[in-house]
Amino acid sequence: MKCFFMIAVCTVVLFVPFRQSDALAEETTKVLIVTGGHGYDEAAFEGMFRSYPSLACTFVALQDDSEVFEDISDWPYDAIVLYNMTQNISEKRRENFILLLEQGVGVVVMHHAMAAFTGWPEYRKISGVTYWLEDREEEGVLYPRTQWKIGVDMPLHVEDPEHPVMEGVQDFTVHDETYKGYRLEPGNHLLLSCSEPRSQKEVAWTRTYANARVCTIQPGHGPSIFEDPNYRRMVFQAIEWVARKR
């Protein structure tokens, strides 16, 4: 009887879902979550963020591509999550965005936000990636349009289990949308890779820009991925890391 009881307890522990510790829940991280320019499952996406008790999330659906950066004089957020695919951003808003990064506000770039602001070269240096919306020639080199495929099983491998963003995250498989054919910037630190041939190998990384920490995560089309415990843990820890809370 004693042996059976011990085995049962161990089984339960193995399947306990990701939960934040009481210590983390006591410290609130203010997060601006920016959407717009691309459809998504709002209930599943927002539900993931509302499940994190230590995050105070404000959701903003952009109406004119980039208005959140129009006035940053009273900026209250520790981190920005970009989940938009909007394109236009004025010179003033570009300068304000960079000023926030110089002040140490962290950024998490999720999924289709890799393809936001494609006409702004500096955004590539922020996100660590260039996503080609169409075939394009630059400096004599022709870059074909980045490819995508919805509904693919993506085997994901943790490349750096010691990094704070990946703490406790195990190799896992998600059913999501792949991207392939984007160009990576120098200086990315690889966190997660994918072995699916229709996907780029590098699918999550960190980098720094000015005084800001940045984490880019390619998977995230949804909706089922937003329920995956490893993905949820990674997103939460990415936010805490860019906000310098871990």
Image: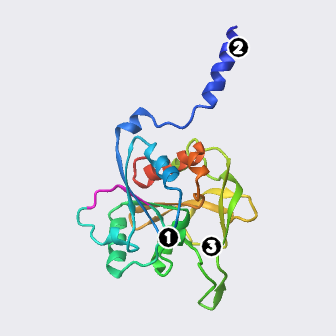
Which amino acid does the dot numbered 1 rest on?
Answer: Met
- Find residue 208 and name its label: none
Measure how far apart labels 3 and 1 are at the Cα level: 15 Å
Q: Residue at x 27, y 70 (%)?
A: 71
Which residue is labeled 3 in the image? 182
Classify mark 2: residues with Cα within 10 Å, few (<14), some (14-19) or many (20+): few
The reply to whether dot 3 and dot 1 touch (C-beta < 8 Å) is no
Q: Residue at x 48, y 47 (%)?
A: 47
**Considering only order in the chain, which callout, 1 or 3, is on the residue closer to the N terminus?**
1
Classify mark 1: residues with Cα within 10 Å, few (<14), some (14-19) or many (20+): many
Which residue is labeled 1 in the image? 85
Q: Can residue 106 be seen?
A: yes
Q: Is residue 213 above or below residue 144?
A: above
Please say whether residue 80 is one of the residues in the magenta stretch.
yes
Q: Estimate the x, y position of residue 156 in percent, counting from the top left.
A: 68, 53
Q: Nearer the viewer, residue 24 or 68?
A: 68
Please say whether residue 125 is one of the residues in the magenta stretch.
no
Q: Nearer the viewer, mark 3 or mark 1?
A: 1
